[in-house]
Image (cartoon, rainbow, N blue to C red):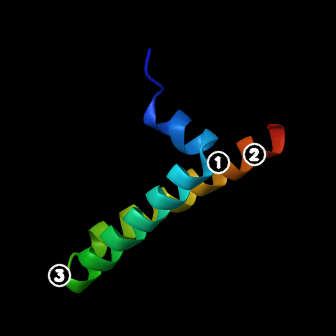
Amino acid sequence: MQNHPYEIIALNEKARNEFYQLCEKRITLLKQHGFIAEAILHAKSLRSIQADLNELAQFG
């Protein structure tokens, strides 16, 4: 059985860092092309995911 993507980024630091980099790139591209509202939504989602993963790290 394959791990859920959220499990992968929670357990694998390299995958987590790559995920963060891709999210930042997407946010930057959205801003560059004028999709400000979408960029804000992605940034909020990223912060939420980072907070969740930081909390999980305290238990690991």
Residue 53 is tagged as 1
Q: Are marks 1 and 2 in contact (CB under 8 Å)?
A: yes
- Write the residue at 59% across / 44% down: 12
Frontmost residue, 50 versus 19: 19
- For badge 2, the amino acid type reads Ala
**Alpha carbons under labels 1 and 3: distance apart:** 30 Å
The quadrant the C terminus occupies is: top right
Q: Quadrant of residue 1?
A: top left
Closer to the N terminus: mark 1 or mark 3? Answer: 3
**Alpha carbons under labels 1 and 2: distance apart:** 6 Å
Circle 1 sits in a helix, a strand or a loop, which is it? helix
Closer to the N terminus: mark 2 or mark 3? Answer: 3
- For badge 3, the amino acid type reads His
Residue 14 is tagged as none
Mark 2 — residue?
Answer: 57
Circle 3 sits in a helix, a strand or a loop, which is it? loop
Residue lying at the far left in this picture: please name it.
33
Mark 3 — residue?
Answer: 33
Frontmost residue, 14 versus 7: 14
Q: Residues within 10 Å of mark 2 (few under 14, many from 20)?
A: few
Circle 2 sits in a helix, a strand or a loop, which is it? helix
